[in-house]
Image (cartoon, rainbow, N blue to C red):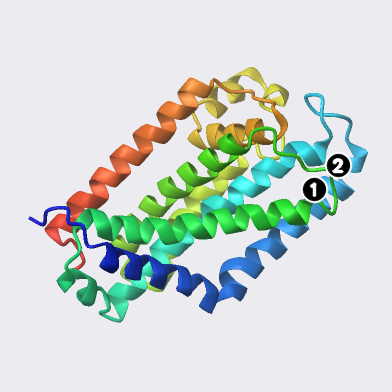
Amino acid sequence: MRKFSTNWVGLYTFIRREIERIARVATQTLITPWISALLYIFIFGYVVGRKIDLIVGVSYIDFVLPGIIMMNVISSAFAHSSSSVYFKRFIRDIEEILIAPLSYIEMMIGFVTGAVVRGVIIACGIYVIALIFTSATIDNLWLFIFYTTSVSIIFALLGILVGLWAKGFEQLNVLNTFVIMPLSFLGGVFYSVTMLPPKLRILAFWNPFFYFTDGIRYSMIGISEANYIVGLIFIFSSIIILGSLVWVLFSIGWRLRE
């Protein structure tokens, strides 16, 4: 079993490669989600939003903007780590990492950092785009950074698991298509949970994506519909559970040494 080392040069190199990968395919990693967010903001916020009265005391576009940011942060972080792990397995590049003097924790940090950087860049880019259509604000910058970063970590870890599990390119998008996107849309991105019938409202409170969206919404416009303690429990427990699972799979070499 590898012990945690202090190979800062190796870790820096690993992280730099992950970040450079974002720049090499910027059209796919950055431009595409920004264009997608622009369409969401323009159609749902600007066009449709002008026909909708205030929602929980703010304009519709200001209410949905945090959800649009969170959706793109989630999908970007997940896509980055899942594709990075899978392609390294596919071209056998993962073997270079396995024989390098890096601990499993450092390997995790390398993959996760690249995903977090991509998620934060996406969030900042969407915010700048939103300034064209709305007086977008950030009520609490530190909370904005916390929720953007922590959610990116969660889905980076989840992406690593999918990257290890996938045996083909098509399997990389299975979880995103059938779990992440549906739960994101059902997590209060385009509506307030107060608009839901009582029974559906209960289901919304069991959806962790609701707490992710609500957290970043609170950081931006100061409005929250969820219990922040429950949200923090979801966030920290997810990081601990997923991080532990990834470490175990790395340590036993599952799908890495095939």
Q: CA distance from mark 2 to mark 1?
A: 6 Å
Q: Are marks 2 and 1 in contact (CB under 8 Å)?
A: yes
**Picture residue at 46% right of the left edge, 42% below the top:** 150
- Work out whether 144 lies above or below 89: above
Look at the image and tell me in which quarter the N terminus lies: bottom left
**In which image quadrant can residue 58 be found?**
top right
- Work out whether 229 lies above or below 158: above
**Picture residue at 20% right of the left edge, 67% below the top:** 256
Residue highlighted by disc 2:
49
Callout 2: helix, strand or loop?
A: helix
Q: Amino acid at mark 1?
A: Phe
Callout 1: helix, strand or loop?
A: helix
Q: Position of residue 212 (x, y in %)?
A: 54, 37
**Picture residue at 24% right of the left edge, 44% below the top:** 244
Q: Position of residue 54 (x, y in %)?
A: 86, 29
Disc nearer the start of the sequence (2/1) = 1
Q: Position of residue 90 (x, y in %)?
A: 30, 77
Q: Nearer the viewer, residue 103 or 166?
A: 103
Q: Is residue 233 left or right of residue 5?
A: right
Residue extending furthest right?
Answer: 51
Q: Is residue 23 left or right of residue 85?
A: right
Q: Residues within 10 Å of mark 2 (few under 14, many from 20)?
A: many
**Picture residue at 23% right of the left edge, 71% below the top:** 97
User: Mark on residue 44?
Assistant: 1
Q: Nearer the viewer, residue 194 or 7?
A: 7
Residue extending furthest bottom?
Answer: 91
Residue extending furthest left?
Answer: 1
Q: Position of residue 214 (x, y in %)?
A: 61, 32
**In which image quadrant can residue 222 be found?**
top right
Q: Amino acid at mark 2?
A: Gly
